[in-house]
Structure formats: structure tokens, C-alpha cells
Image (cartoon, grey):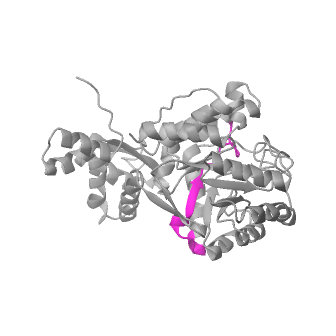
Amino acid sequence: MRIVKIDNQIEAVKILKKIDVDPYGVAAMAPKTRQLNVMLTGQPCRTANILKQEMLSLGADAAVARGSVACSIDRTDVLLMGTLKQLRALPDKIKKQPFGLDVIAQELQTLLGNIEPNRRIFKTSRREIVLGEKTLIMGVLNITPDSFSDGNLYFETDRAIEHALRMQQEGADIIDIGAASSRPGAEPVTAAEEIDRLLPVLDGLQDSLSVPVSVDTTKAQVAKASLSAGAEIVNDISALNNDGEMAAIVAAAGAGLILMHMRGTPRTMQTGDLVYADLMGEIIDYLKSSLEKARLAGIEAKRIAVDPGIGFGKTFADNCKIIGRLCELKTLGLPLLIGTSRKAFIGAVTDSAPDGRLEGTAATVAASIYGAYDKLWKRSVEEPEGTAATVAASIYGGCDIVRVHDVAVMKKVAVMTDAIVRA
């Protein structure tokens, strides 16, 4: 007798087929092997009461506030609790009912489709990148005098080009180039200064770099110049909230786009309000708002990835919680990028300076990859030490792309973690 861990639909089907279950039984029973919890916030009591009644009729349940049955309160959050099979049956039971239940039915069907591991295509202005078969490595190239861990190391054009080519040789799948520091407390840089730093490096890489280049900027003018000079992806840490022209520039170029969650600006983000009533819920809602801006600008979903913004307006504890609950971001149905490399929360845990955070980063990377194969209802994460540890943690949590400084080491961490979790 033993416990069997079933992480996804594919594994469930394999086990049932090995038992030689009838094909009809496989289809019927595979969804019963998986328990899900789905949160709906701020629902009217009459809506919540119908949801609870229908979940009970399916042999499942729904948690609501104590005053909702008598409608002594206006609204309540609702936690749907059931097997995948039961939750898949719910939309058909509520889609023709009143009080907005038809919308809930559609959203639930979309969410259930988004959480399954799958192969995706991420489109840039020049190519299609396959995601889901392995974790991609994004190498960091800061051409700044003041970045938190490698400021001034690659500020000179020749050294920047050399480092980009070295990271490609070490296994980087994308090179992310930033010309303005986004460390806590960083002062803003003008668009003209960013462009002056970026263009010589982009020009020097045109004929020698085979992997795509991402430009880390919040300014539309910088993005436009960089895309014209060969960049294919815009990594906007403001998620289209800093420059109203950014979405149009990305759409016109057909570029890839990375949207990141951040409170405030790099200069103010760690000194303002760092209290979240619902950490993951607020991150997801923020990203949804930016996704709507992208949609209205004509940027198709296949060109967008999301980033929860580790270290950007979060406490050290928040950063650890995000990695442990990274799989919840899969509800957006988009590729997930995470950047934990050498960040301060690793130093707080391991008592190390930026250049001593290798092992901690690796742990976060591995944990973040695994979430694509873990569940929304399983949130425990192993917490090894150091920078290498944070890379590992990110892989464990379902990440498609990890943004790192130490490409050669993190490539090995990702390859080994992939081999384990995708076996």
C-alpha cells in the first residue's frame, strides 16, 4: 500500500491506463484524482448561495461568510472546493442562471484550461519561441554604472558585447539588456541617456548574437529605438503604466512583451506601502489590468509573458511567499518569467552579499520551474540555501523563463530540475 502523487491530468491518465481501466473509465476518473480550490472574491450573497448549493449537489462544497445564507451581509468571498471533475461540471449547472453566474461559468472554464501544463509559443518580432519543453534562461546584461550587483562591470560597450556573447555560449536563450538601474532607490535616467548606452551594444551584437535580445525599459522612446536596432522583446517593469505610448510601440513592432508587477517606482518602491491584504490576488489583478491595456492596443496574447516582480515593492517574506505560490499565476494562462537572481531577500536569508547569493538563487529557480507541474492547491516548497536555491525554487513553481546573472551555473540547475520534474 502506498500514496500516489498525481500532479496533472497526463499523469492521472498514465496511471489509469497502466491499471488497464476501460477508456471510458479513464476519461471519467482522471479528473477525480485531483482536488482544486478556486477563490471568487466579492460575490453578492445570492450568487454565493447558488454556488454553494450547486457545489453541494455535485458532492463538493463552497466556503462562504457566515452571514451570506441569511443575506445579512452584502457580499462574500467564495472558496470552491472540489475535484477537477466536479469543478468542470459546475459551469454547465450555472451558465443559464441569473446574477452574473453565466460570466462566472465562462471564467471558470478558462481558468481550468489555463492551469494544465502545456506547450506554448511566445512570439517576438523575429521568431517564435517554444515554451513548455524546457525552462529558458534569460541572461542579465546591465550596461549601467549603478546596478545593485554588477554596476559598472559592463558599462563599456566592448565589455558589454563580450559578456552577451559569453552568456550565449554558456546557454542563455535570451539576453536582457538594461541601461537604467531598477535597484531600490535608483534615480531615473533620461530616455536619451538610455538610448546612447543601448544602441552601440545592440549594433555590435547584430551579426554575432543568434538568440533574441530583450530590452529592459519603461520608456516607449527607448523601446522604439531598441526594437529598430535589433531587440525583439520589451521587458517593461512598469507593465505599461509608466509610458502611455509603450503599448502602441510594442504593437506596431510586433514585439514580445513582458509585464511585471511593481508598486511605485524603483526610487520609491521599498519605502512606500508594503502591506498587501491579498498578495497574490493583488498581483494578479494588477497584471490583468495591464493585459487589458495590451489587448486594447492590439498586442496578441501569444506575445506576452508576466512577471510577479520579486523585490519590487515587496517585503522579504512576500518574495518567499510569491515563489511558494507561483503556480497561482498560471491562472492568467500566460508564460511566466521570474527574476530572483542575487536579490536582497536571498541575502537576508543566507546572510550574504550579492556576489555570495549563488546557491540561494539556484533554490528559487528550481522551485519556480516545478509549479507548472504542481497544483494550485499544493503550495509547499523546499527551501535550500543561497542564490542557486532561488533559481531552483522558481523552476519548482512553474516558471517558463528565469532571469539570471550567472548563466552557466543556472543553466545546469535548470536542466537538472527540468529532468526531474518533467520525467
226 or 190, nearer to the observer: 226
Is residue 188 at least partly visible in the picture? no
329 or 255, nearer to the observer: 255
Residue 258 vertical position relative to residue 386 in the rendered view, above or below: below
| Residue 342 occupies quadrant | top right
Q: Which stretch appears magenta?
A: 295-315
The picture places residue 87, in percent across and down from the top left corner, at: 31, 50
Residue 325 vertical position relative to residue 240 in the rendered view, above or below: above
Q: Residue at x 83, y 54 (%)?
A: 158
76 or 369, nearer to the observer: 369
The picture places residue 116, in percent across and down from the top left corner, at: 39, 51
Q: Residue at x 31, y 47 (%)?
A: 9
**Residue reaching furthest to the left:** 22
The picture places residue 154, in percent across and down from the top left corner, at: 81, 49
| Residue 33 occupies quadrant | top left
Quadrant in which the C terminus appears: top left
| Residue 288 occupies quadrant | bottom right
Magenta stretch holds residue 366: no
